[in-house]
Amino acid sequence: MTAAPLITVRDMTVRFRTDEGLITAVENVDFEIAPGEVLGLVGESGSGKSVTAKALMQLNAKNTVYDPESHIMLQVPDQPPLDVLSLKRERDMILVRGGAISMIFQEPMASFAPAITIGDQMVEQLRLHSDMSRKRAREISIEMLDRVGISDAAKRFAQYAFEFSGGMRQRAMIAMALSTKPKLLIADEPTTALDVTIQAQVIDLMKDLVAEFGMGILFITHDLGVIAQTADRVAVMYLGRIVETGPVREVIKNPAHPYTQGLLHALPRLDDLDAPLVPVAGDIPSPLERPPGCVFHTRCDRAIAGMCDTRTPEATTVVEGHEARCFDLTKGQEVA
């Protein structure tokens, strides 16, 4: 990476205070994203991807506890580096939320106020983070609705969320997130509700904006196929820990961690339609029953008794820029 990181996450551990005690959702996570870079964050549901994303904007629930060693450093142009976790007041977060960082959430219906038009919500956001006139904010909002593939955007601007289909709400939410031209866009499963043609359009739009504005993107999904088309680097997360990172083509072609290999083997292959799908064995444990040692050892066919169930593996370099946390990388195999 040549450019200075836009955001740097170090030793981030996120816990939730519950009646059962402190529950660990994310543990010792490290990553960084440079301007103009797309980092894909992949893993099964329950891996901690959304908790990680919301932590970057302090959007997790009020019972969230961050370990003192956790740091999220945001580099905003013409500003000194800012530790997001040091901000304690809501008004201090305006620079971060919707300004430097925007987020596309998984559930579009929950992201819009039902009694306010889509357009009014977009205009309000733009005026909150800039000094532009209402007329100019309206023009930009309609332009963004059009760019994400919503036909007759000027008419749709004046409608409410319940008048949109699920796919249209998803696209309107993407338009709203992109309208402020944030430095970092967090896209949490942004194409889940879209058909493949609109999905391709949205991915192309994100690529255009990265090229146009030098925006960094944290792209969260469980779909490695989408990541292969979109990301520059990928981080594979399992039960709150990042188990493998590297350039996306390197990781997909030469996965080193058994979990990454399992995710890739579970994908259908167009060159061999008769090949059976091989799911990752077992189920992801509940955070209430977090395994000791390597968090994946309860589902791993390469687990070493007395080692994997007691010790946490450190990051090991596979090739330059490609790391995995596993005690036994010698049995890694290429996935076509």
Image (cartoon, rainbow, N blue to C red):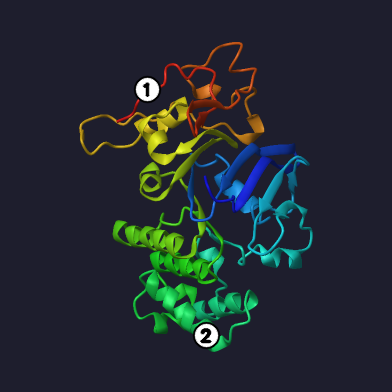
Query: Reading the chain from its start, which is encountered first: label 1 or label 2?
Result: 2
- Residue found at x 57% / y 31%: 285
Which label was assigned to residue 333?
1
Q: Taking the image as drawn, is residue 129 in sight?
A: yes
Residue to which mark 2 is pinned: 136
- Above or below, 101 relative to 310: below
Q: Residue at coordinates 46% horizontally, 29% vertically from top-left?
A: 259
**Picture quadrant where residue 12 is located:** top right
Q: Position of residue 82 (x, y in %)?
A: 71, 56
Quarter of the figure that contains the C terminus: top left
10 Å crowding of disc 2: few (<14), some (14-19), many (20+): few
Q: Amino acid at mark 1?
A: Gln
**Percent of width and height locating residue 237:** 53, 37
Q: Amino acid at mark 2?
A: Arg
**Mark 1, other Cα within 10 Å: few <14 / some 14–19 / many ≥20:** some
Q: Residue furthest top?
A: 306
